[in-house]
Image: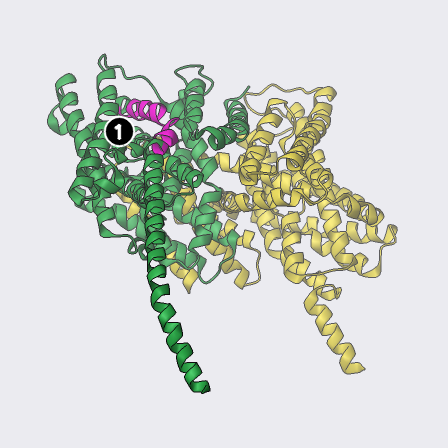
Chain colours: A green, B yellow
Amino acid sequence: MSPALILVLAVALAYLAARVAFDWLARHFLFVSGAEYLLLGILLGPQVSGVLSANTVQGFAPIVTMALGWIGTIVGMQFHLPVLVRIQGEAYKLAFLEALGTLAVVAGVELVVASNLFGMTYAEAAVPAIALGAIAAVSAPAGIEVVARRLGERGTVVRQLQVTTAIDALVGITALGLLFCIHHPEGTATWRPITATEWAVITIAIGVVGGALFHLFLGNESDPDRIFISLAGAVVLASGAAAYLHLSPLLTSMVVGAMLVNTSRNREQIARTLASAERPFYFALLIFAGATWAPSPRVWWIIPVLLFVVARALGKIGTGRLGARAMGVLPVLGPSWGRALLGQGGLALALALNYHQFEQTLLPQIVFTSAIVSILLTDFASAHIVASVVTPLARRVRRQKAESREQKAESREQEAESGEREAGSGVGRVGEGRVGEGE
Amino acid sequence: MRRVAILVLLYVGMQLIIPLEAGTSAGGPQTLLVFGFLVLAAYTVGELATLVTLPKITGYLFAGIVFGPSLLGIVTPQAVRELAPVNELAIALIAFLAGAELKWGELKAHGKAILGILGTELVFSFVLIVGALIALHQWVPFLQGTSMTGVLALAALFGAVAIVHSPSVMIAILTETRARGPVARTTLGVVLVADVVVVILFSAALALTRAIVPAHGTAGGLSAGVLAWEIGGSVIVGAILGGGIALYLRFVQRELLMFAIVVTFFGAAIAQLMHVETLLTLVVAGFITENATAGTGRALLEAMERSAAPVFVVFFALAGASIALGEVASIWPIALAIVAVRGFAIWSGATLGAKWSRASEPEQRYTWMGLVSQAGVAIGLVIVMADAYPSRGSQMRLLLLSVIAINQIIGPVLSRYALVRSGEAVESRGSAAEAAESRG
């Protein structure tokens, strides 16, 4: 049986399983995950069954890059400025503190570990360390969304979590994208080496040109088919150009997405079009990520992997708490609100896969394994973790609301009583007046 | 002006990006860059083509030629090779969508006229094209240095592709003109049924030619049983696949975009696994899906058409990019001769067939004009043929793509003319009503 056919069958079966079983599990037991596809990919890949050979997996690299581009565009579509400016600045400050704090904690720990354990220079060790920091920064929004829907709760905590996951994605993608600009293979095509700043400008420029092309291509039309082809062309071109130049397709596509959401009148239709193809791309990404995985040849690989999980958890919870205290919102968010951000999700995998695609020498397997282990450990339980944070706070908020309602009711009653007393005399006065008028 | 700006921006962008490449890229990132470029550039050229009343497909082919290795060189031969999976996917999609256009009710209603015209026109076209190739075989590159039996077999294979029509062009012209009437119905019926017949004929011709003229590195000889399985098996596998799709649409009907992509990949993969003809398998699957779902299949077909749009654009552009202009220059007299013979055969065959089946006067006069266009299915068969014959196939592909390109330019113009002259196009109906009003 050909690898392509096996792959199609596997995807179809996994999909049916997801529709039948996992939807039910998500509704009833808060089980939201894509980790099962990741496991399926590992099982099908060259490390376990060998159904998908290394060459086959390599042959599907353009599809993976396309999927990265699609995911990056979806992330970029979150940054609609008119909506963003309605959110308080403190929420962003806290989100940035948490994201950058986690990145710094994880990158710092991994820098020390990589340089001491594997004998790398600090300059070398910084590359995988920052990549791991960027991966650690991102959090899964799916669990938060499920819990919010289930609780019917859109209070301060949920809103803060939603803002934070968006900022986490921004920080993670930007950090990895800039890492590719700094640690870029030297080319021979130009008369002098291109600097990191120039690569960063090129990365952004590709995204901007991609967005501009979409607008030029679409013109004044709003036909869904035309939007689809314009979007597919712009995203594929931008991510393809980035991949061709060893830059991050995620960052360029995020710029495309941010540009489209802020400049297009058809933003709802674009979002719908992106969402319609999100699941196939997401499944493909998970399966190929699983199939791409290979154990590291280094003996002590388990140490940085485990430290990644531990440092990330400490970073998320610790910097979340410190940030909330600094912003004076600890009583509202609670001391462990950062725990709700522990779920990793598909974007972390996309970042790890992106690093694995381009970086062949500096611990690619360790970075990739760390992301996979973290996803497997946190993803199945992410909605439960969110619920464990949000539910008590929501209860507290409801209780406080109920109490304040009671207090208000009581005070209204008191006011009413005193009002009645006052109004009784007033009515008498009006009555008296009327009576007087009648007279 | 906007479209020209897109092309300039794309061209300048590619000229800036390509030299920057660090030289260490792995895993074909250029493939995706070229794919994205072709989606936008070829689609834009396709739109420019519509401004001069040419079909979009002609524009896609033209874009491939212009940006391909022969002229500007943005699409390199390596990129064309790396994008080969796009061709396979496009062929499967074209076949499925073509099969889905066959509606059982319409086939029954106009069966006599359709079969009469189809039978004579296909026989005339096939015989005359094969005859012309045999007569010209000394000047036809892929027939040189072959025995007479080989010439006959290869000419038959070439003829089986050259007689193909274009359902996609016909449907596009009908949509554009909003034509309703006997000429429109009969032409569409002939084009669609001919697709199935031609795919069967092509499968048989390819199997026989492989037996008589084996390609380098492959074993010759083919039993009647294998040939029967290639055709009969395609129908069985296609019917099972179509039945499965119909069941999914009846009981699940969710995530149709993803399902459409999976169906196409699965159909192509299962056809290869079962050693049956991919095109015929998917034509049958499309036919069963359309006719067994009583309208519920429409949503799937729409999802499929949407996902197919970028694939088709790149598919046609790649077909254009694979045309080596230098070589075309050497064969254009033969290409023109084949176009002329094919045109004559279609005219004489369709007119005679319509007369014999006692079709109406407009059908007798105008149906042949809608049969000249060639597009997706023809290019799909050319690529299958070129894969089967790696060395001769490239020469055959060159000649056939030249023939298809010429027919692409003149075919849609003729189709439109026929519908307007027969009074079935909305614009002609309007002018006829105005004339009657002024007379009255």
Which portion, as a residue range, is magenta?
A: A367-387
The residue most toward the front is A439
Q: Chain of mark 1?
A: A
Q: Residue at x 27, y 48 (%)?
A: A204
Look at 66% across and 52% down and name the residue there: B171
Question: Which residue lies at the image location 57% right of the left edge and 59% below the top edge?
Answer: B54
**Residue B2 appears at what percent x and percent y?**
41, 63
Q: Measured along the vertical axis of the image, is residue A426 above or below residue B174?
A: below
Query: Quarter holding the N terminus of chain B?
Result: bottom left
* Mark 1: secondary structure: loop
Q: Amino acid at mark 1?
A: Glu
Left-right relation of A22 to B157: left
Quarter residue B104 falls in? top right
In front: A349, or B179? Answer: A349
Q: Quadrant of the C terminus of chain B?
A: bottom right
> Which residue is tagged 1?
A359
Q: Tell me the quarter of the picture where residue A423 sits.
A: bottom left
Residue A369 falls inside the magenta stretch: yes
